Amino acid sequence: METVVSGIRSTGKLHLGNYYGAVKNFVQMQNNYNCYFFIADYHSLTTHPTPSDLHSHVKQVLVEYLAAGIDPEKATIYIQSDVPEITELYLYLNMNAYLGELERSASFKDKIRSQPDNVNAGLLTYPTLMAADILIHKATKVPVGKDQEQHLEMARTFANRFNRMYHAEYFPEPYAFSFTDKLVKIPGLDGKGKMGKSEGEWNAVYLSDEPEVIRKKVMRAVTDGGPTQANETKPDAIQNLFDLMKTVSSADTYQHFENLYNTCQIRYGDLKKQLAEDMVLVTTPMRERIKAIMNDEAYLRQVAKHGAAKARESAFSTIKEVREIIGFKSF
């Protein structure tokens, strides 16, 4: 059975972009693959080096993974920092990662522009840590968003480089994977780019958001004066709303508003009200499960402990073999 690895940063709550872009696929994958899903608390320190409450963020994401349908009896769900073997492999990969290729990473360039006062080594070596997350379980399939495709390409580079340098066909090449054969990108409500907390609190709809919060966020979404001619091309902000509707609404609902737009009869207020109600409908079952699981401390401890043990068993095997390949031996 092929191995799948993926994770979500622990900087806060899961939003619809996380759910449709990754977690919904995870729920399907766990029935067909050997899955490792982790909460990336190490990664979060690259942008939040002094988190106000790291543990509560990790707990929130763990709860929401479970509420969204990840089954700890089918998949291995664990916290990244519970598996120290990951950082050991990260060290080995860094020894064979070159400054130039790390500096050319698109995400590194973006981050040094967005946080010029915190250009840390973790940002630079983010691709090697991501590679370690994947290679520690010798995964061949990695569900990633479009913004992570370059990192996955670098993971393949590091895996192949290790194999060449040590003359061992050890690490397999990992590839992007989605049950839909398409990497999903969920737009945000600001009309500019993808949904995400880093883009502003009002840009994302979270799985735990109460209905009134969802309605307020959607009604604030950016729109324009409306089309002036039939079948007019939609501006980005309007296309984003239609893309969101295509994701959460029925096909009939989407087509209804598409027809109104194409005939210049669209009323954005009606569209946003419908979109908000469909988002409320989608998130309600998960929101109710989040509330129930959040208060079950014994269950959460059991899940975290069980996941760490399973992940470390796999990781220990890899590190043992990697150390032998490199030449580390005990006296």
Image (cartoon, rainbow, N blue to C red):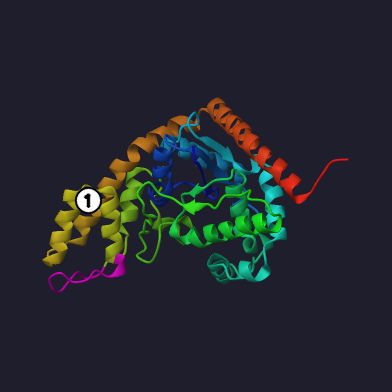
> Which residue matches tag 1?
274
Predominant secondary structure, magenta span? loop
Picture residue at 31% right of the left edge, 42% below the top:
282
**Quadrant of residue 157 within the rendered picture:** bottom right
Q: Is residue 233 left or right of residue 69?
A: left
Residue 161 locus on image (x, y percent): 64, 59
Residue 132 locus on image (x, y percent): 62, 51
Vertical comparison of 59 with 144: above or below: above
Q: Nearer the viewer, residue 123 or 64?
A: 123
Asked if residue 323 lies in the magenta stretch, the reply is no
Residue 238 locus on image (x, y percent): 27, 65
Residue type, numbered disc 1:
Gln
* Segment tinted magenta in the rendering: 224-237
Asked if residue 226 lies in the magenta stretch, the reply is yes
* Residue 262 seen in the figure: yes
Quadrant where the image shows the C terminus: top right
Picture residue at 46% right of the left edge, 49% below the top:
143
